[in-house]
Image (cartoon, grey):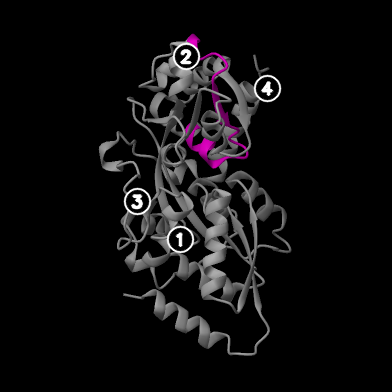
Amino acid sequence: MKTLEYLLLGSAAAFPAGAMAAELNLICSADVVICEKLVSEFETSHPEIDVNMVRLSSGEAYAKVRAEARNPQTDLWWGGTGDPHLQAAHDGLSTQYKSPMLDELQDWARGQAETSDYHTVGVYSGALGWGFNTEIFADKGIEAPQCWADLLDPALKGEIQIADPNSSGTAYTTLATLVQIMGEDEAFDYLKKMHANVSQYTKSGSAPVKAAARGETGLGIVFQHDAVAQAVEGFPIEVGSPCEGTGYEIGSMSLIDGAQNEEEAKIFYDWVLTPEVQNMMPDAGSYQIPSNAAATPPKEAPDLTALKLIDYDFAQYGSAERRKELLARWDEEVGSLPLQ
C-alpha cells in the first residue's frame, strides 16, 4: 500500500530545501469549507507548494476550463459531479493520468477512470435526494415527501429550491436521473409541473438545502450528504430519498491538459486519493462515501446499499452531446418559465 508517508517523502525529494516554492492552480467544486480544508492540509504537508484555489460549481468549472483551452490557467480540477468531468475528457480538456493509487480505490472510482480512458477518477460518491425543514413543514401542515411524485403537491408551492443544471452538477444529475427513471418527455413534463413549486434556481448545488436550514425555503433538492451536513450542524433538516429510485454522483478529479504545473498537480492528485486524507473530510462537514477502499465512510453518511439507486448511465449522460441536448431543452422548456 502506498501510504501517506511514502507520498510525502516522494514530494520532499522532488523539491529540495531552499528551492523556490512551486505553485498549483486548483479548481475545487465541493463546498468551500471542504476546499479550504484540503488546501490547508496539503500546504501544511507540502510547504514547498503554494496552492491557488478557486471554488466553482461543476458547470462553472467546466466552462472555465473550456474557455482557457488554448492557454490553460488551471492545473487540476477536484470534486463536483462526474458528468462534466467526463465531458471535459471527451472534449480533450483533461489529460490521461494513471495514479499509483488506482489499485486502492473502490470499483466505482476505478470505473470512472476506465470510462474516461483515465482522464478522470472518482474521489467520492453520494446519492441524490432532498433535505426539508421539519419546522416549516410542521407549521404549514405539509406532509414529508416520500417520492419524486410528492414534490408536485400544491402544498409545496414556493417551498422548493433546486439549482440550475447549467451551473450545477447536482441539478444536472437530477435532470439526468429523472430522464432515466421516467423517460425524457415525461421527465420534462414533470419538471414543468414542479416548476410551479420552485421559488429559486440557485447557482450552487448545495445552496437549496442551506436555504432550507436557514428557514428561507421548505425543501432543497440536493445530494443527501449535503442535507446530512446541515442536520449535523443542528439545523432542523430531515433527509429524504425518493421511493421511485434515485441517481448518484461520482465526484471526480481531472488533470487539465496543458497544465503549467503538471508535476505539482500529480502530487496533489495522489495525495488526495490516500485513505489518510479522505478520512479527514468529515472534519470539514463532508459526508460523502470516500473512494479509497481503506478509508472509513463517515458514520453519518447515508448508507447507499439501503437506498434504491438506479443504474445511472455515466457514459451516456456524461457525454458532450447528451448534456448539450438536455441542457438546451431545459433552458427552452423549464428555465424560460417565469417563477411564480
Kindly identify the residue that appears in the image at 49 percent across and 9 percent down: 154
Q: Closer to the observer: label 1 or label 2?
A: 2
User: Which residue is depicted at the point 51% across and 33% down?
Assistant: 209
Whole-percent x, y for residue 226 in the image: 46, 40
The part of the chain drawn in magenta is 154-174
Q: Quadrant location of residue 18? A: bottom right
Residue position for label 1: 117
Dividing the picture into quadrants, the one containing residue 54 is bottom right
Q: Is residue 320 magenta?
A: no
N-terminal label among 1 and 2: 1
Q: Mark 3 points at which residue?
A: 298
Q: Could you tell me the amino acid type at mark 2?
A: Asp
Q: Which residue does the image show at 45% across and 18% down from the upper left?
A: 137
Tell me: residue 69, above or below residue 249: below
Residue that carries the numbered disc 4 in the rendered image = 336
- Which residue bears the numbered disc 2? 139
Q: Does the magenta stretch include residue 158?
A: yes
